[in-house]
Amino acid sequence: MMKDITIEKVTLNIGIGEAGEKVEKAAKLLAAITGRKVVKTKTMKRIPVWNLRPKLTIGCKVTLRGKEAEVLLKRLFKAISNRLTARNFDNLGNFAFGVREYIDIPEVNYDPTMGIIGLEAAVTLQRPGFRVKKRKTKKAKIGKKHLITKEEAIAYIQKEFGVEVE
C-alpha cells in the first residue's frame, strides 16, 4: 500500500530560446493540447552571446496532475510509439522524453499558422508519504528504502501504460 507508485505531475515544456511571436505560438499550442493556462518562462541571467537578458520570455510550460495527467501521458506515449529508453529515467525514478512534432499526438490537428513545433514532457512519480519533504512544518527527508528507484519506475511504466523500455 505505501509502496504503490503514482504520477505526481506531468510538465510539458517548450523552450524557444528567443522572445517574440514563436513563444506566443508555443503557448497557444500547449493550451490547445492540455486545455489549461500556460505559464511563460523567463531568463534569469544575461548571456550576451545568445542575445539573452534578464526577464526575457523564452519559453512556456504547463503542469497537469491527477487523472488529467494520466490521460495526457497515454496520448503522449502514442506519439512516441510507446517506446522509451532506460536513459530517459533518472536515479530517483522520474523520467522525461521529447515529442519531435506536435502533430504526432492523437487528437491534435495541424495548424498551418503554427508550423512544426516539438515539446518535452517531464513526469514526476511519487509514493504515499512523499509529502513530508514538501510540507510547511516539520519537513523531513524521505528514507532510502522509500525512494523510487530507476528499476521500479521502469516496471511501473511498463505495467501501467504498456510502454516498451529498451
Image (cartoon, rainbow, N blue to C red):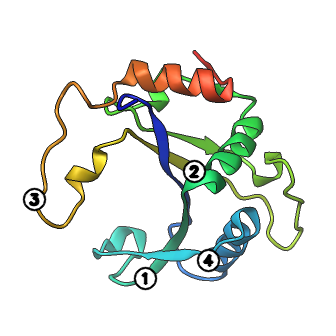
**Mark 2 or 4, closer to the camera:** 4
Which secondary structure, mark 2? strand
Q: Amino acid at mark 3?
A: Lys
Where is mark 4, residue-wise? Answer: 37
Per the model, the C-alpha gap separating discs 4 and 3 is 33 Å
Per the model, the C-alpha gap separating discs 3 and 1 is 37 Å
Lower sequence index among marks 4 and 3: 4
| Image x and y of residue 94, in percent | 42, 38
Where is mark 2, residue-wise? Answer: 120
Residue nearest the observer in this picture, 140 or 109? 140
**Residue 119 seen by the camera:** no
- Check the image and report above or below for 87 versus 109: above
Contact, mark 2 vs mark 3 (Cβ under 8 Å): no
Contact, mark 2 vs mark 4 (Cβ under 8 Å): no
Please identify the quarter of the rendering in which residue 159 is found: top right
Q: Residues within 10 Å of mark 4 (few under 14, many from 20)?
A: some
- Check the image and report above or below for 11 versus 78: below
Q: Amino acid at mark 2?
A: Glu
